[in-house]
Image: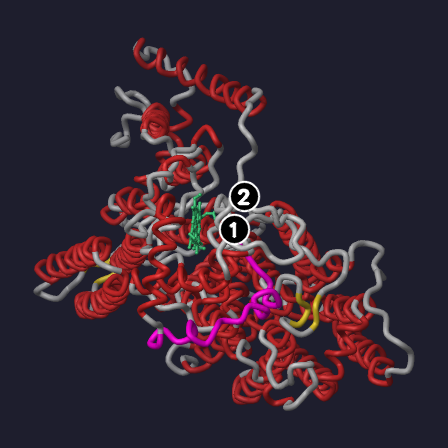
Amino acid sequence: MSNKPGTAGRNWLPLPVGSALIIIVAFILLKSVRPVIPHSVILLYMGFIVLGVVIHITLEDTRIRRFWDFFLAQPGEGGVLKVQRLAMLALLPLVAGWWAYDSVRPTYAPPVEIFQRHPTVGEATLAQIVVPPWALVPANWRDSDIAAGKVLYVANCAICHGDKLDGAGSAAPGFRYPIRPANFRDAGTIAQLTLPYVYWRLTIGGLQNQFNSAMPRWVAAPGDANASSLHSNDFTSDEAWQVILYLYRETGYTPRAE
Amino acid sequence: MGWTADADRRWMPVAGLALAGLLIAATGPALAQSAPIRDYAEPALIDSRLAVWVAAQLHLDFAAFVLAVPMFALAIEVFGWRMARRDPAGAARYDWMAHEMARLLPAAYSLTAISGAFLGMLLFSAYPRLMAYMTETFGPTFVIYPMFFVAETIFLYLWYYTWNRLQGNRKWVHIVLGLLLNIFGTIVMFIANAWATFMMTPGGVDEAGALISLYDAVWNPGWMPLNVHRLIANITFGALLCAAYAAYRFLSARTEAERALYDWMGYTGNLIALFTMLFLPFAGYYFGFELFAYSATYGVTLMGGVLSWLFIIQAIVIAILFIGAAYYAWLGLLRIPGSEPQRRMVPVFNVALIAGFMVWATPHSMAASIEESTGQFHPLLGALGLMAPKMIAVTLILVVLYVSYLLYRRAGKVPVVPWARTGTQVEWALIALMALIILGLGIYGYFAPADIRIKTSIWQILVLIGGIVITFGIDLALLKGAETRAAVRWGTMPRRGQYILILLAFVIVWLMGLMGYARSGARLNWHVFGLIEDTSVSAGLPTLGEAAIVVTAITLIFFVLLGIAFAISALSGRDTLPEFGDEAREAAA
């Protein structure tokens, strides 16, 4: 698109063709990235790229003129230019047609779901969770509790969350993207959360209509109709607290203050 | 002259008083507490929450406009007044622009009052129990509020309608009137903010919600942050709407002189908006910080939970705002003859800006269908969606905007200082160095642990600010006494630039609606967070799609109403336009 003014529409790569090429090449590049980039994100990127191209063309009056002049046949123009113009004129309806087809074509994929990192829970629910005194202050955590927590973690959680607490357990690749066992070393997980929240997340939260967590719960809430939990190794509440303390001690984070 | 202006004058205070009357009429029975109070009612025949949502947001939009415009219009008026002795023509022009910005106020003010009356009426009739509680808690402020409101009304009309009379020696009286208007307007907003933030972060009450200290209820944890955030955002908002108004007048102008003036007004509005917009993220962090400190639930809801997706939409919309503003600025080079050397640089900036915003808007985790599932975070996007690359992107975007501004300053000028050539080279080398350091810090931060990463991002901002201060100093010295080869030719901006201004106004109104929803929705199922639960049928949050539709509808209604206000203000006839002389143009640039 480095056309010099004055050669309006007569050079080898006219402005509209150059613009179309940029858009097409960008699209193909984005599409060929593996693992695939989700459609929604490609749409976002292409929006920006098209915007950039439109801005470029409309920044100068001469460029706008050159853009439109290309579509008008000039006497004595070369065959190359003519072919390009016809190609561009054919391209637009083809793209529109493909777009229309693509949006109505039947697909068997379930609807896209929006992933929430931390499901929302009411203040009232959290207020009911009482942190036992021995778990309250990080400085007073007992080594025996941490050690017990480690045993529980390795037995129950490591398969998903990984031996190193980095979310890379051996079962992790089986999860449907973008949901993935949390990487506790990432600053975006437990470091952001309060003790009652983590407890809620582990024992009550997750499998509810708002948020289909992929993680099983570890305690059946009393009187809950869904109490037949998905597994057999429920924790007592003390055990749940021990695991949580282990998560924090091992990663070096402290719970967020309430 | 003009009959509409007079009509305005007559029914405006009436609307204000009507609102006050309504409030008192509605609070009266609630205070008396004679009959048992129902929890909910549906006076609007549609879902009450929807009705209140629309009324509240419309009221907020108009109020924001009415509050903000007198602030910068007064600043411009004072600016013109100060230069009156040096440059009477220039002073007249600034005075004209301030007046022109204020022109929409009477009509917009009436719409503020009407939408406020609607909101009050709806709230009291649809949420009797909640409003009885609010009245009990905030009773005295409900009495003071209308008084300040009336004071604001009086000074608004005084300030606006005495404009031509109080010129010359008596200009200072007019400035004082404007100052009082701003003070009363700010107080009115602060009082209303107390109610809104009390519902988010209640203070000054005991666990059952009984009032202990009205002072603490007003000065609750969220109050100051929201005051600051709204003050700044209002100015961005008002300035962009004024710019859109100027664009509209530019497009419908019949003479060169008119076009020149409105071009200049649109440019100024856009500049004010861009400048204030730079502070908004910090005000937003301050507000968010206080909210999170108040309750971790807010942190979870806003940043990781249901409402976190609004912030991704916000990122994209902000990108559009900045790209639009930059495009407008680049088009502005066309106003300056002989700016070809500068214009040649613009395509490079364009690429940098677009690439920067693509990184900035990349979501960390995203909506993907099962066919796109990979079983892990996307290696490429997961990396781009992180804090460090985004910080690089944002700071480099700011560098690009800054350099665009430097080019604009340089266009059409020839430096006269002997060291101009080396100076320019040093300046550009410094800017390149600044960009490199920012990039390097970002890459280092990317691989460093979180606590160091936060430090590198602070350093990035410090390098940016330091670099701007140094290079701008050089630039000032360089262009000292520079010869002007061609002055800005106001009025020659292409029409598409004006449409951009209108688009930006639309975008900011929409964005304000969206984030207003985020602020209000963050309370989830609480009217007053932790104290009064929402047990109505519509307690749940709408889906993002529904929320976006409502916000869009509100934006459309707002513009239809504002359009009517535009039309009314245009009816009052055109003032005589000030001259746009050569030396004046120079000063304006």
User: Nearest the camera: B167 or A94?
Assistant: A94
Give the residue drawn at x 78%, y 55%: B47
What quarter of the picture does the C terminus of chain B occupy? Answer: bottom left
Say if residue A232 shows up in the picture.
Answer: yes
Say whether residue A72 is left or right of residue B18.
Answer: left
Residue B310 is situated, as x and y percent measured from the top left of the image, at 52, 53
Residue B341 is situated, as x and y percent measured from the top left of the image, at 23, 47
Disc 2 residue type?
Leu
Q: Are marks 1 and 2 in contact (CB under 8 Å)?
A: yes
> Circle 2 sits on which residue?
A230
| Among the two numbered marks 1 and 2 on one chain, the one whose residue lies closer to the N terminus | 1
Residue bounds of the magenta highlight: A119-140
User: Nearest the camera: A115 or B562?
Assistant: A115
Residue A156 is situated, as x and y percent measured from the top left of the image, at 40, 49
| As drawn, A24 above or below B113 | above
User: Which of the 4 image quarters holds residue A180?
Assistant: top left
- Is A53 included in the stretch rendered in magenta? no
Give the residue drawn at x 37%, y 38%: A171
Q: How is the image coloured?
A: secondary structure
Give the residue drawn at x 48%, y 49%: A233
